[in-house]
Amino acid sequence: MYAGAAGMALVAVLIVAGLYLAHRAVAIASAPLTVLPFQSGWPPEEHALSRYHVRWYLATLLFLAFDVEMLFMYPWAVVVAQLGITAIVEMFIFLGSAFIAVLWAWREGALRWA
């Protein structure tokens, strides 16, 4: 009954194990994050997985908000002529809410880089 699913799971496990063993066979160093350079050939000054300052999280959220806004605006631009004034009113409501989000981010200091 579940032979197909079990077979696929076995194949997936074998592929992952094979890739893991292939990596172990061809790896240059045991700790590449501390040995290899990572920024255009410059030696690392800090660990590659070091923590970021909290202000970057606010900037990232702001970027994601505008990225999602663009995802909404592309299909809107295709159908705005067909839907008429209703689509325009909806877009202004949406842009107003995005503007409120920008004002909140500005108040929280997400746009301050120093």
Image: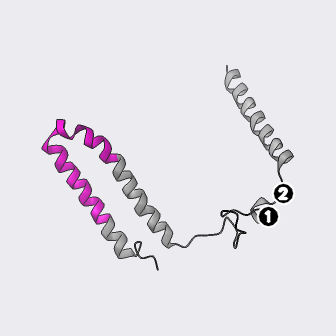
Judging by the rendered image, the residue that carries numbered circle 2 is 29
Quadrant into which the N terminus falls = top right
Amino acid bearing label 2: Ala
The numbered dot on residue 110 is: none
x, y percentage for residue 30? Answer: 84, 57
Confirm whether the magenta stretch covers residue 99. Answer: yes
Label pair 1/2, CB-CB below 8 angstroms = yes
* Boundaries of the magenta span: 72-101
Out of 32 and 94, give the one closest to the viewer. 32
Residue 55, image x and y in percent?
Answer: 48, 72
CA distance for labels 1 and 2: 7 Å
Q: Find residue 54 and report its horizontal and vertical position in percent.
A: 52, 72
Q: Farthest residue in the top direction?
A: 1
Label 1 neighbour load within 10 Å: few <14, some 14-19, many 20+? few
Residue at left 30%, top 70%?
103
Q: Residue at x 32, y 47 (%)?
A: 72
Task: Identify the mark at residue 35; answer none if there is no mark.
Answer: 1
Q: Mark 1: which secondary structure?
A: helix
